[in-house]
Image: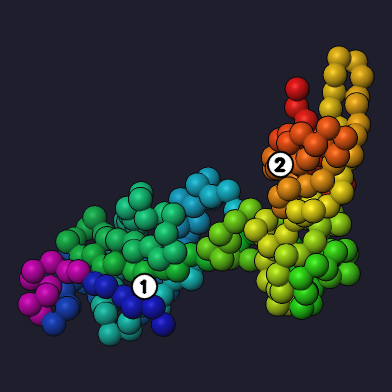
Amino acid sequence: MLGLSTSLSPAAASNGNRLTASQASSASGQKDSNNHAVVQRGVKNYLQNQLKNKQSVNQITIDVADIDQRIQIVNCPAGFNYHADENSFSQAYISVRVSCNDNEWYLFANARILRTQPVVVTASMISPGTVLDIDNLRVAQVETNRLRHTAYHTTDALIGARMKRRVRQGQPIQANMLCFICKGDRITISAQIGGMRVRTSGIAQQDGVLGENIKVINASSQKLVIAEVASTDEVVVRL
């Protein structure tokens, strides 16, 4: 269970974390055990509204910590107010201040935010040098904080790439794990000159993924050029 921080007015704090009789009276007077559930739902709804336009990920799960039943939450006819620091909305744990305008009562409720997105992962253990195909790939929801490099969202984007190291089952596939063209591969170098497309053979001098610039040797002239990886067997020189 996540921890819960509470802050009450000085008068309430001196009374064992409970409101004084006069304060309770000003808040309609009586403790309502249902208010614990009301506040937790309110915190979740508040965070959903705040986060829906702030996140680019596809899925957000909000887990609000249970509020200790020993903490008195008084009735608030006008409705509870919820507020969190704007800078905390990108974090995994958010503390929300819950208050009532009818009195000086307030507490802090904590919530954990799980952010996930659809990412291609390995369907089984994959060895170095394996050429990826539809059988060893699948798409799963993955926590964004597990991703440190470029990830892929569709299996089609990875067909034909080669793994550079051993990867266990269920591991998100990221750009640093693979190469579409690997160092030493014989490839086609393509260039657009005027209205003509010129092609020649070459040898890759670096590993590269789609869209990445790598060094290649022109097999005919033995000149080193920089070209963009276009597929698993072709690079393009931008003139």
Part of the protein shown in magenta: 7-15
Q: In this view, does 238 lie above or below 127?
A: above
Residue of label 1: 35
Q: Which residue does the image show at 70% across and 42% down from the upper left?
A: 214
Q: Position of residue 69 (x, y in %)?
A: 33, 83
Q: Which residue does the image show at 42% across and 54% down from the upper left?
A: 89
Is residue 145 shown left or right of residue 17?
Answer: right
Q: Are marks 2 and 1 in contact (CB under 8 Å)?
A: no
Residue nearest the viewer, comparing 182 with 184? 184
User: In which quarter of the view is residue 107 placed?
Assistant: bottom left
Residue of label 2: 215
Residue nearest the viewer, comparing 48 with 25? 48
User: In which quarter of the view is residue 216 placed?
Assistant: top right
Q: Position of residue 169 (x, y in %)?
A: 73, 77
Q: Residue furthest top?
A: 194
Is residue 44 shown left or right of residue 170?
Answer: left
Residue 44 in view (yes/no): yes
Is residue 155 shown left or right of residue 151?
Answer: right
Residue 208 in view (yes/no): no
Task: Kindly report the distance in space between the C-alpha atoms of the residues bearing marks 2 and 1.
Answer: 65 Å
Residue nearest the viewer, comparing 146 with 214? 214
